[in-house]
Image (spheres, helix red, strand yellow):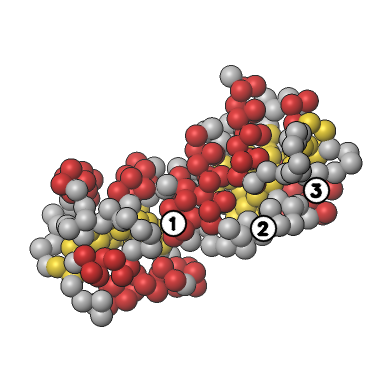
Amino acid sequence: MPQPDLISSPQNPRIKNLLRLQQKSAERRAQNLTILEGHRELTIAHQAGAVVQALFVCPELAAENQLRELESMFGQLPDWFMVSKAVFEKVAYREGSDGVLALVRPPRHTLEALVLPANPLLLVLEAVEKPGNLGAILRTADAARADAVIICDPRTDLYNPNAIRSSIGCIFTVPTVATSRPELLNWCQQHGIRTYAAALTDHALPYTEFDYRGPTAFVMGTEADGLTPELMAACDQTIIIPMGGYIDSLNVSTATAILTFEAVRQRR
């Protein structure tokens, strides 16, 4: 059952620790914890098997039905704390919070441990650095039932609280792996996965000309720099989404969604 004591001081050691975890990726790695805010996000993560270490709830912000659902899911959790509105607003990292925040152990996936079907659909991101883009792509991966999201040489903490927020908790529903370019390419070759690099080159062909029903990985670069020449050259095929207007590219999360759901359409 929830603990009756109310945390009302921002100097409380647990509140100070929440702020450290929110602000510092090194602290998240050291404690093997991350912060998840929001009832909906927490519910999705819990249903996906996420390990919740502690729960902080503001009774002034949380709705009654949310409190009942939380008690049903986490009634036996020993580290359940009530927090005053002033203190909760200090640790909340988004506007209009619903008063629910949890400490969660991030799952650690590796390429070797991935369990794949015969014809996996994978999304590969190189050097992703914007948590918002990562979160949006994870939502696409969840909606399309992609088998994994693989990050080559990430420039951001995959379990950054903002990435979790942008993904609405989908980082817990889709196996997400951080690896290096050589490891990725060797692994794809070993598993017979055909790689399609999304890049604007002279040799790129429209994405609609290919069959994605076999083992497929869409390889996406950053919006600022695109794919590195090394990874682009190592992929099996370069593809483009034809542009009919003045611009020559789309937001990476939008482009990923278009390619992913074309593969889904073909497989259905």
Q: Residue furthest right?
A: 202
Secondary structure at badge 1 equals loop
Residue under label 2, please give it. 127
Q: CA distance from mark 2 to mark 3?
A: 13 Å
Name the kind of residue labelled 3 in the image: Met
Where is mark 3, residue-wise? Answer: 232
- On the image, numbered disc 1 is attached to which residue? 106
First in sequence: mark 1 vs mark 2: 1
- Total numbered badges shown on the rendered structure: 3
Q: Residue at x 54, y 39 (%)?
A: 141
Residue at 54% in and 57% down = 131
Callout 1, which amino acid? Pro
Decide which of tag 2 and tag 3 comes sooner along the chain: 2
Element at label 2: loop
The disc labelled 2 sits on which kind of residue? Ala
Depth check, front residue: 260 or 88: 88
Residue 114 appears in the figure: no
